[in-house]
Image: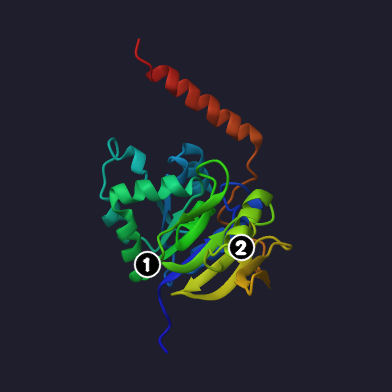
Amino acid sequence: MREDGRRILAMGGGGFSTSVADAPLEHYIAGLPAVDHPNICLLPTASGDPDDQIDRFHRAFRGLGRLSHLSLFRLGTRPMSPREHLLAQDVIYVGGGSLANLLAIWRVHGLDDTLREAWERGILLCGVSAGSMCWFEEGVTRSHGRSRPAQGLGLLPGSNSVHHSSDPERRACYRGAVLDGLAAGYAVDDGVGLLFAGAELVEAVSARPDARAWAVEERHGALVETPIVPRLLAPSSGAGHDAPVEIAEFRDARRERQARARRSRPA
C-alpha cells in the first residue's frame, strides 16, 4: 500500500513558545520533510500575531530551514497572498492561543480551505495547543472562559485535548465530554507530539522524559484511557535555540511595545 503523504504533527503544549527544553521537537519537525533546509512558516493567528511569539519562532528554528511567518492581522501593511505563501511551504506551524478565534479568522481569509489543500499536497501541518486541536473534528477550548468542546477543521477524525497533565480543568472537561458523547480521541501532555499519516497515528514523540499521551474513549458507559508511550527525542544541539529565554526578555519586549504605542499615539 502506498504511504499516505498527508502528515500532521499535533503537539499537546510547550514547544518554542514556552520552553527551550522542547527544542528537540523543533529539530524533529525540521527533519520530517524530504528536503534539506525546508521552508517553514509560522501561523501565529491564535494569539493575535504577537511579536514575542514570532521572534521566538525565528530564534528557535534558526539554521533549521528557510523561515517566514504569515500575519493575517498585518496584511494591510504587509500585503501578500496567504494561499500562495502557504502552498510554497514544506512545513506550516500553527502557534497556540484561542481555538475559537483562530478558526473564525482563518475562515474569513479562506485559510480553512487553503490548509486542507496544503495537507492534500503533502505539506506538513503541525502545531501546539490550539494549533494542535484545530486539525481534529473536535477539541476542548478555553476561548469562552471555562473549558468546553469546540469544532475543528476535521482533517483528522475524532477529538483532541491538550495540556492534559498540566490543566486539570480542561482534563476534567474532556473526560466528561467523551462520556457524554464527544468523539473518542487523544489527550496529550505538554512536550509530546503525535504524528499522523492520513488518519493513522504512526508515531508519538516527546522532548520530556515523563510526558505521555492517551487514547481516550467511552466503552459501555465507562471512560477508558489507554497510555501512549512516546519515543524520547535526543537532546538537540547546534542550530535552533541560541540560549534560554529569560523573564527579562519578556519585560524588555513589553517595554518596547509600550514605547512604540506611545510614539504612535496622535498628538
Q: Secondary structure at mark 2?
A: strand
**Does the rendering let one see residue 228?**
no
**Does the rendering let one see residue 168?**
yes
- Sequence order check, earlier mark of 1 and 2: 1
Quadrant (top left, top right, bottom left, bottom right) of the C terminus: top left
Quadrant (top left, top right, bottom left, bottom right) of the N terminus: bottom left
Q: Position of residue 246 (x, y in %)?
A: 65, 38
- Point out the frontmost of discs 1 and 2: 2
Mark sitting on residue 119: 1
The residue carrying mark 2 is 187
Q: Residue at x 41, y 66 (%)?
A: 155
Q: Position of residue 116 (x, y in %)?
A: 34, 64
- How is the protein colored in the picture? rainbow
Q: Secondary structure at mark 1?
A: helix
- Circle 1: residue type: Trp
Above or below residue 42? Residue 226 is below
Q: Residue at x 35, y 39 (%)?
A: 73
